Every structure is written in C-alpha cells, then in structure tokens.
Image (cartoon, rainbow, N blue to C red):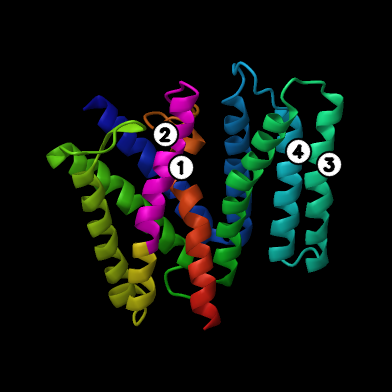
Amino acid sequence: MNNLVLRSITGALFAFVVLGSILWGPYSQAIVFSIFMVLGLLEFYALFNTHSFVQVSKEIGVFIGIFIFCLLVGVSLEWLPIISILFIFPLFFTLILAELWRKKEHPLINISVLVFGIIYIVIPFFLTIDLNLRSTSYLPTVIGMYLLIWTNDTFAYLTGRLIGKRKLFERISPKKTWEGTIGGILFTLLLGYIIGAFINQGEELFWVISAMIIAPCAIYGDLLESLFKRSLDIKDSGHILPGHGGILDRFDAALFAIPFFYCWAMFYEYF
C-alpha cells in the first residue's frame, strides 16, 4: 500500500511536469524534454557500466545525442534552416570513428549500443516537440497521446492486479497478464473515443485509431524495456523517480509508441 501511494504521488507530479510544460508552450516543453532526454541517455548507457564486454563511451554518446537533438529541435522551432539536418549524418559517422582510438575488444557491439541509444531515446523526445508545434486541436495532440499511453499503463496494472491470472510474457515480465493487457486496451479505446467525441469534437476516427495504435505499441515498449533490464539483470533503470525507478522506466511505453503515433498523425494530417 505504501508503495502504491508513493507511485501515485510521484506519477501525479510527473504528469503535472510533462503536461504543464506542453501547455505552457513549445519553449518550456523543449527545456523540460531536453532534460528528460539527457537523463534518459545517461541512464541507458549506465546500464552497461558493469557489463562484462559492452564498454560504451557514454560521454561521446550523450554529447552526440545532445547535438543531434538540438539540431532537430532548432529546425522545428525554425531557429535553424532545414538543411542543418544534414549534419546528423557526419555526426553518426564521427560516433563510429571514435571507436578506433578506444582499443576495446568488441567495437561493433559498442558502436551498436551507442547508436541504438540515440535512436531509441533522442528521436522519440524530439518527435513529441515537433508534434506539439504542429498541433492545432483544442486538446494538443501530444497531450492526447500521453493520456492514452498512461491510461493503457495504469488500467493494465489495475486490471491485472484485480483479475489477472494468465501470464502474458512470463519469460520477460512475469507480472503482466492477458487480463491486464486487455483491460488496458479497452480503457484506452474508451478514452480515445471520449477525446474525439467530447473534447476534440468530430475527431472520433482519428483518436480511436490512435488508441488502437498506441495501446499495443505501449505494451511492446514496456516489454522491450523489461527485456533490456532482464538481460542485464537490473531491476530499475535508475532511482530518480521514487516508486517508479528511472526516466526510462517511466517513458518505456512512450518511447516505442511515439514514432508510430507520430507517423499516423502526419499521415492523417496529410490526407
């Protein structure tokens, strides 16, 4: 019970910071999300601190990650010309070349981990900022996205606690159940309909399909993070959020769901 209360308080404060920064404006969101992004990168590379053969240079990964993030956000905010994106390609190759001087035994694995960390963390955080800049709805699109992700996560947990019996993926996450998964999906679909019918009126199709995309993606994102931690024999990615763990523990579902939702939102807007 004490852990549930702690999780609830931390979760409420976390939601207030995330949603508040988005509503405040693109600059406040860019600042808050850049902090989350840097903390997420540090957590990700720190997962391998005690690994037997993966020896990544987190300083290089974080530096290149911040540089790429600033380029992308600068272009979205129209601070930089769109041609600035071209610098991303030599930055990635600089990341690879740095391994020449490190003299480690498994350079290919080290490079793979460094590059994956940037793709897995930097890109989703940038996409949320770009999505908010494009939104013209009464309820900002990116807020609706987070509400759907959190609804799936919350009601999957609650439904699983109440009636969960059949294990979903016991090898990776033994506490997740089919009953909890279905409960999370149903409540996410319900919220999607409510957003489209009563908040952003006339957008039922967009938000119901969004819920259909987000719910399974959020589940896969959660399972993927669990797979990482289980393979590294780690319980939490960090300890910055009491009751939740680290930044990656709190954003695990979002990091996987954001790119899929972003593609759907751009496709819907285009047509």
* 150 falls in the magenta region: no
Residue with the mark numbered 3: 94
Mark-to-mark CA distance, 2 and 4: 26 Å
Mark 2 belongs to which amino acid?
Answer: Ser
Mark-to-mark CA distance, 3 and 2: 31 Å
Mark earlier in primary sequence (2, 4):
4
Q: Is residue 119 left or right of 199 when viewed as pictured?
A: right
Q: Quadrant of the N terminus?
A: top left
Mark 4 belongs to which amino acid?
Answer: Phe
Residue 226's disc number: 2
Mark 3 belongs to which amino acid?
Answer: Thr
User: Cβ–Cβ below 8 Å for labels 2 and 1?
Assistant: yes
Mark earlier in primary sequence (4, 3):
4
The residue drawn where x is 52% and y is 64% is 262
- Camera-near label (2 vs 1) is 2
Mark-to-mark CA distance, 4 and 3: 11 Å
> The magenta stretch spans which residues?
213-235
User: Cβ–Cβ below 8 Å for labels 4 and 3?
Assistant: no
Q: Nearer the viewer, residue 145 or 156?
A: 156
Residue 215: give x, y in percent of width and height: 35, 56
The residue drawn where x is 71% and y is 57% is 72
Which secondary structure lies at badge 4? helix
* 226 falls in the magenta region: yes
Mark 1 belongs to which amino acid?
Answer: Asp
Residue with the mark numbered 4: 63
Which secondary structure lies at badge 3? helix
Please say if 47 is above or below 20: above
